[in-house]
Image: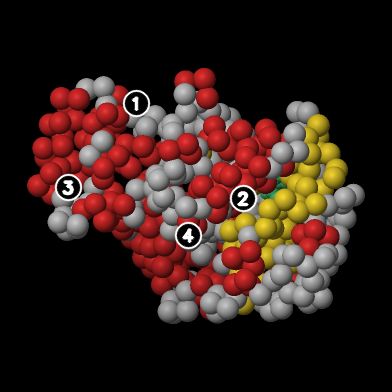
Amino acid sequence: MKITFDNSYAALPAQMFTPQLPTPVASPAIFARNDALAATLGIDLHAPDAAQVFAGNHIPDGATPLAQAYAGHQFGHWNPQLGDGRAILLGEVIGSDNIRRDIQLKGSGPTPYSRSGDGRAWLGPVMREYLVSEAMHAMGVPTTRALAAVTTGEDVYRETRLPGAIITRVAQSHIRVGTFQFFAARRDLDALRALTDHVIARHYPDADGPAALLDAVIARYAQLVAHWMGLGFVHGVMNTDNVSIAGETIDYGPCAFIDAFSHGAVYSAIDQQGRYAYANQPQIAAWNMAQFATALIPLMDDADKAVADFTAAVHNFAPVYGKAWLGVFAAKLGIADPGSKDMPLITDLLALMEQDGADFTATFAALSGGQARDQFIDRAAFDAWSARWEPRKAPDADRIMASANPQIIPRNHRVEAAISAGVAGDFAPFDALLAAVTQPYQANPDFARPPLIDEIVTRTFCGT
Ligand code: AMP
Ligand code: MG
């Protein structure tokens, strides 16, 4: 297989990564190929050695396989030493759209950063990441992508024995807030400077230094989290090592889309305090930006001035996010000229949805067709709300709403069903679900249906 690599991260200072080959696996088989993405990258996923390449058994010419170093706050607790423990960056490719992207294998064997882990992934999280990241992309949300997925022919051991798998993840980069924290905590200014210069050149060419970079990252991250909120998406592990500097959604571990709406929705089995509950996501995002700001301070000549300036920049997250959130939900309601007076209209609808346990996606999808009333128990309350909404709708409200309210999301129970079938060797449900979620605005009653009571998924688990 020929991949035209153009690797820039591997040329950065040596302490930023460790050269590391994937560990070969017994008998790889490809079960998912993203041909559209592959075309952009100039990669032929049907080459005879494709399974070998995306399993890490064959290293294509031009690759510089490495594991990246990073640190992070996990559930608020500082961990100075994380890094790619089960992922290997093969290199970067500049696509036909002129965008530089990382090609990374995830689940490809141990690295110096594996700590007690086995460096592997099992099929379930690989399937979930593939489905959800491609759905997010189809819904216009910045995200890492899935290029290919293989089963390894080897078992991995979690609570039980499970089939191993590897996903090939594509991202604008895998640099995180935690990458900056790693070098800031070590007072390694050479690496911190090189990383900052690399990130500015690669992702924010208009930024003229760390202060402008901070503002730009805050703007992208605020927009990203507003997107999530508008889809009822609960990321589940908003640790600083899972915050992409490029503003993409990354790490589809215990993520989920809310069915019956609740502000406090938590799915992750390990998030017992609800730190990363749906409604907490904006505040956590601001906290993550404060950690990013802290990591940039050592670069500044006048630390006192930098602390004052960066504090103001982090405080600016809330208004920037608020504006993005209003824009997202106004579009969902077909409002063309949103103002602060629309905020109670939106929050009152969400409160009513929570009170009645209305399905998040189905309710918004039904607003355009005029069928949303059926989603509520307290119809009089909905009618009263609707009377306030009606005069705010734009003349082309239905058109605005149609592209802001997906009909199809990767519903948790369908993802779980696809995983169960995949573990049993049947990938047809995965293929059907992938086809449905990558056409999110197309009517598709089977996949649009909310879960029945006995189908509801209340807990998701990390990929480890
Ligand atoms: P995550 O929860 O996926 O964000 O991962 C947090 C940290 O744990 C990262 O440093 C991962 O590389 C590492 N990690 C997660 N799972 C494994 C595994 N199975 N083997 C080795 N390292 C892992
Ligand atoms: Mg992670």
Q: Position of residue 457 (x, y in %)?
A: 53, 28
Q: Position of residue 411 (x, y in %)?
A: 50, 37
**Between discs 1 and 4, the one toward the N terminus:** 4
Q: Give left or right: position of 401 versus 159.
A: left
Point 63% across, 43% down: residue: 430
Bin the neighbour count of mark 4 within 10 Å (Cα to Cα): few under 14, some 14-19, many 20 and up.
many
**Between discs 3 and 1, the one toward the N terminus:** 3
* Distance from the alpha carbon under mark 3 to that under mark 2: 36 Å
Point 38% across, 62% down: residue: 219
Whether label 3 touches label 4, CB < 8 Å: no
Q: Amino acid at mark 2?
A: Tyr
Can residue 201 be seen here? The reply is yes
Judge whether 275 appears above or below 49 on screen.
above
Whether label 1 touches label 4, CB < 8 Å: no
Task: Single out the mark in the foreground, 4 or 2.
Answer: 2
Please name the residue that numbered disc 1 is placed on: 357
Quarter of the figure with the C terminus: top right
* Distance from the alpha carbon under mark 3 to that under mark 4: 26 Å
Can residue 182 be seen here? The reply is no
Picture disc at residue 342: 3
SS at circle 1:
loop
Whether label 2 touches label 1, CB < 8 Å: no
Q: Amino acid at mark 1?
A: Gly
Quarter of the figure with the N terminus: bottom right
Q: Give left or right: position of 402 versus 73.
A: left
Please name the residue that numbered disc 2 is placed on: 130
**Between discs 4 and 2, the one toward the N terminus:** 2
Q: Amino acid at mark 4?
A: Pro
Most foreground residue, 382 or 246: 382
Please name the residue that numbered disc 4 is placed on: 142
SS at circle 3:
helix
Task: Single out the mark in the foreground, 3 or 1.
Answer: 1
